[in-house]
Structure formats: C-alpha cells, structure tokens
Image (tube, rainbow, N blue to C red):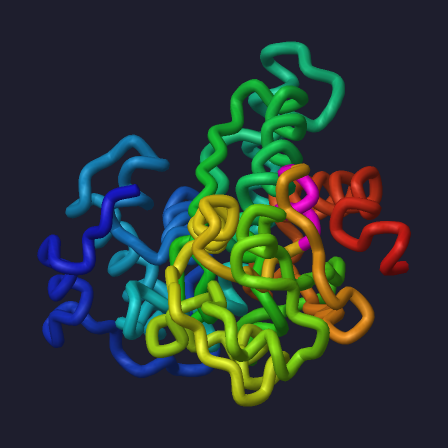
Amino acid sequence: MTDDRHDNDASFDSDEERPPAKVAGAVDTRRIRSDDLRYLLVVARTGRRAAAAADLGVDHSTVTRRIRALERTLGVSLIERGSDGWELTDIGRAVAAAAQPIEAAVERAADTVVGNGAESLRGTVRVTAPDAFGTFFVAPALAKMRLHHPHLTVELMTATRQLNLHQSGFDVAVAVGAPMSSRLVSETISHYVLGLYATDDYLTEFGTPMTVGEVREHPLIWFVDSLLQVGDLDLEKHLPGAAAKFMSTNVLAHVEATRAGGGIGLLPAFLAGRHPELRRILPKQVDVRIAYSLAARRESLSSPAVRAIREAIYKEIKDRMTELIPPEDA
C-alpha cells in the first residue's frame, strides 16, 4: 500500500483553506454533496490520501478538494493530521457515521443493477494482524470471505507490534493484547498457548532442562524487546530472570531458529505443532496464555465490510480452536 505521508499532504493543513467556525443553523443542506460524504468515508478508513485516491479512482488533489469543499459547506474541520496519517476530528467522526447509509445505498444500487440478490461487498478492505496469526488464521479467513464477494479487494498487513493510538490505514486490526485507544472499539477474540520447545538433537547435545531455573542456562529464542513494545510479550513477565540470546521481530523466525537447533524457543503451540521435530519441555511449569483482540474504529462499526471480516475471523477461530489451545492445555 502506498505511503503518502510526504506526498504534499501539507495541503490538508493550508490555513487559507480551513473552514470558518461553525455557526448554529447556518448549514445549507442543499449544498451538501453526497459524493463528498463518500470521500470523507474513504479517507476515514484509509488515513492516507494516496490510498483514498486509489480506492476512489481519482488523483490526490481531487481528494483534498472534495474534503475541503465539504468542510466549507458544513463550516467545521473534519480532518486533522495525526502522527501516522490523517484522523477524523470528533465532529468528523460523527459526520462519517451519519454518512455510512449513503455508501451502503450506493453499493445496494450497484448490486440491483447487476442482479445480485445478496449483499455484495465492494471496494478495498485493509486488515492488520500479527505475523503468525495473520498468516495462518486471518489470511485463510479473509480468502474464504472474499470468495463470496467477487468485487472486494482484500489487503492484509502483518507485523507483531503494539497497535498505535493514532495508527491509521486499516478497517480492522488484530492485536496481541488489548489496544488502548478511545478511538478504537476492541474485543478479545481468542487466547492462545505458548510453551518451551526444542529439537531432540538439541536436547541430546545440551541436555534437557528439568526446572525453569535450568532453562535460563540455555540460549532462549524470543522477540527483540527494544523494538517490540508489546507488554503481553515481555519475556520477564513469563520467564523472570531469563534473557534471550537469539532475537527476532518475527515469530516465524523464532520457529526456524528453534528447528535449526539454535536453542529453546518460547513458541505458540499453533506454530510448534506444525513441526514434529519440536518437542515441548516443562509443559506444566511454563504454560503461557495470551489474548488476541480485534479492533475497529468507532465510525466503522456499522460497515458491512467490517462485520463480514469479524464474522470470518470468528468462524476460522471456532473451527480451529484446538490449534490455538491444544486439548491437553484446555
């Protein structure tokens, strides 16, 4: 996805283009263009002018012009610059929420013309999720969902990181733990189990630890704490006094390093279980449970696409819960 944080976005902040202060009762509803409201909805979801322009099939300047025209008509500021893109102001979010039925009506009209009796989603949806869960659970869930909506384009971005308060550019986010933001509505969708794993060859050569204290004498494989900043993945919280000797920001690299005999990995059971050469050690003493949460912006909760994404991910989890929490750990 194009990152347009530097593509002349300063034009959104031009003082001479800012709308005047709102005067109660001064809005002429005859001047409000429904299409401008659709532009606002797309900017709200993407947080990027380039992404919004691509979705709408126009250039950057058109997006800016239409949003500013809507602001002048309403007499309020709808968009403001955030630390990672564009955010709606409080009144902007309220206006976007009120405009949702317009977009839905346009999509229903298009479906009526082509003869689709069932609701068909259109446009582009963006989902962000942790590397492993995004790859093995969210990706198949979204792929199956899209089969029922042939006019829908799906973008999945994977990274294990803290969901930023001002992060933009997504419709739905899956995060480790609970994202803390008044602009997001989140819910726990599942827990998953992590345990200590190593190969038989490694344990034969270096010995099998019999206590948690002995684990600290082995090279541990884990995240780069200084880059991760996800509280629920703090190694000290799960193995006090332990220090990782092989670190990566990607959990899939943890698995491969453990399979290569590089040490003992604290790995999700749904990943380690895919590799029969990995053996779990000290399952009773080290049984870590961490939550995944699903979050969306308040103004997006009524979006049919957001509802479809949520339902698809929930179904995938329900069908494969024994991978996230193996029966022996239930």
Compare residues 30 and 56 and report the one nearer the observer.
56
Residue 176 point in image, percent of width and height: 58, 66
- Asked if residue 273 lies in the magenta stretch, the reply is yes
Q: Position of residue 68 (x, y in %)?
A: 25, 60
Q: Residue furthest bottom?
A: 241
- Residue drawn at 42 percent across, 57 percent down: 44
Query: Where 29 sits versus 261, above or below?
Result: below
Q: Which residues are magenta?
A: 269-275
**In the visual, does 199 lie left or right of 40?**
right
Quadrant, the N terminus: top left
Please indicate, yes or no, whether residue 128 appears anywhere in the rendered image: no
Q: Is residue 303 above or below residue 275?
A: below
Residue 251 horizontal/vertical position (percent): 49, 54
Toward which corner of the image does residue 212 lie, by quadrant? Answer: bottom right
Comparing 207 with 60, the one in front is: 207
Whether residue 262 appears in this view of the structure is: yes
The structure residue drawn at horizontal position 12% and vertical position 53%, both measured from the top left corner, is 7
